[in-house]
Image (cartoon, rainbow, N blue to C red):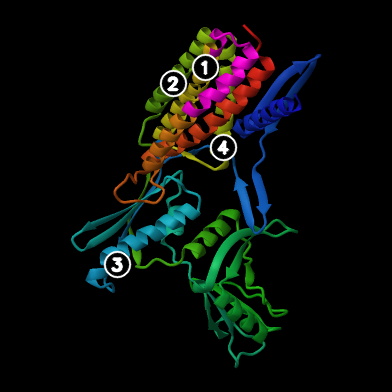
Amino acid sequence: MKKKRFLLWAILAISLLSLFLDLPAVVPLKFKVAGYQIDWQLRRPRINWRLGKNQFTRDLEIKKGIDLAGGSQVVFQADMQLIDAADRDQALESAAANIQRRVDLFGLSESLVQTSKLGADYRLIVELPGVEDVSQAIALIGQTAQLDFRALAPEATAAAALTDFQPTGLTGADLARSAVQFEPNTGEPVVGLEFSAAGAQQFAQITEANVGKPVAIFLDEVPLMTPRVDEPITGGQAIIRGQFELQQAKTLSVQLNAGALPVPIKIIQQRNIGAILGETSVQKSVRAGLIGLLMVVLFMAAYYGRLGLLADLGLVIYGLITLALYKLLPVTLTLPGVAGFLLSMGMAVDSNILIFERMKEEERAGKAHAVAMELGFGRAWDSIRDANICTLITCFILFNPFNWSFLNTSGLVRGFALTLSLGVFLSLFTGVVVSRTLLRTFSKSQ
């Protein structure tokens, strides 16, 4: 009894939290209570958590793919003059992989990075969903982000200028990782640096040799800051403070993590692209899916009665949790991804149908309702498990997480596979745990 009550309250708490996360950023509340006019706005907060050295931030907005939201397209031409002819194809692929890593680190999922070769013309075509500012895309992709630390030359005077600083040999190549952090007192975003083992040793030597002196930090030959070294820094970590906006700090961190491009590139075309699919087409597709779901809900209620209504309640909970998970991960929704979500919702009642039919068989065999219910869940599990494993295998092949060349690499197909696989996992939870708890609590012999 205690376990059943705990599960019920846990399901209620998860459902309410998911509903809160699913709400728009601002929900106006206007109504009258006992003659009093209530005019209030419910604002959903952003998530901004610090987990050790990492920062977890989410704006809890649905991310749309380029086919739904449009974005930016930038075409680069790679300069292969200094690259041997035999190595040019590999250099182009390496540049594409580097750019893909940059946009992935920046949180732009469903991006598309393609290579193009026509004679001696080598190009990179980059499409970024949701990035409306082309200059932002160019800053993210095209800059090299070469970081180096410089110390005062021995002959420098007390009134030394930046020209009196000389390279120490410590560069961005000695970084192990970079991450956006926040000053505990001011909340100002900064960029934290963690050096490799060799870089940490060299950084310690530099700071030890320059106690009481400034050490300049340059980015792409531009001085960022010249902090004074008060004591040797032996932990292999440093902070770049530049009065950054959060977006600037994030971009810099991404560029430092991704490193320099293997070949020089220049822009030959840049443009904003609208949504590939018209708004009308998207609305009709979603409407068709919702009509299909409504038919499923009505069928379950009409055919299974009270049991069907409880299954429909589980389906609503499934939808709330799924949408909240899309915002937390986050998942970038394309139209195929929306199709995967709607399909998974329709499939979410499959397990309930198997369980209910098994329950009917047990009741026809003379079992009491409570016994038949437990036997229905227990004996239907093998079929539920095997059916969902087969679906997950298909999703794995479509998603192609290891980028095997003989399988699909399309971002749109991967979006479908991702939403469908997430739906399968969640349907196991709602179809078995949620439905079982609801049935144990509210279902009686019919």
Which circle marks residue 287 in the picture? Answer: 2
Which circle marks residue 79 in the picture? Answer: 3
Q: CA distance from mark 1 to mark 4?
A: 31 Å
Check contact, mark 4 vs mark 2: CB within 8 A: no
Q: CA distance from mark 2 to mark 3?
A: 48 Å
Which circle marks residue 325 in the picture? Answer: 4
What residue is shown at x 38% (from left), y 46% (from top)? Answer: 400
Q: Nearer the viewer, mark 3 or mark 1?
A: 1
Q: Nearer the viewer, mark 4 or mark 2?
A: 4
Where does the C terminus fall, quadrant-wise?
Answer: top right
Q: Nearer the viewer, mark 1 or mark 4?
A: 1
Q: Which residues are magenta?
A: 362-383
Secondary element at image label 4: helix
Inspect the magenta stretch and tell me whether residue 21 lies in it.
Answer: no
Q: Percent position (x, y) of residue 222?
A: 52, 72
Inspect the magenta stretch and tell me whether residue 371 lies in it.
Answer: yes
Taking the image as drawn, is residue 30 in sight? yes
Q: Amino acid at mark 3?
A: Asp
Secondary structure mainly formed by the magenta segment:
helix
Q: Percent position (x, y) of residue 433?
A: 61, 28
Residue bearing mark 1: 358
Q: CA distance from mark 1 to mark 2?
A: 33 Å
Check contact, mark 2 vs mark 3: CB within 8 A: no
Q: Amino acid at mark 4?
A: Leu
Left or right side of 337 for 92: left
Q: Amino acid at mark 2?
A: Arg
Q: CA distance from mark 4 to mark 3?
A: 43 Å
Dot 2 surroundings within 10 Å: few (below 14), some, or many (20 or more)?
few
- For marks 4 and 3, the one nearer the N-term is 3
Secondary element at image label 1: helix
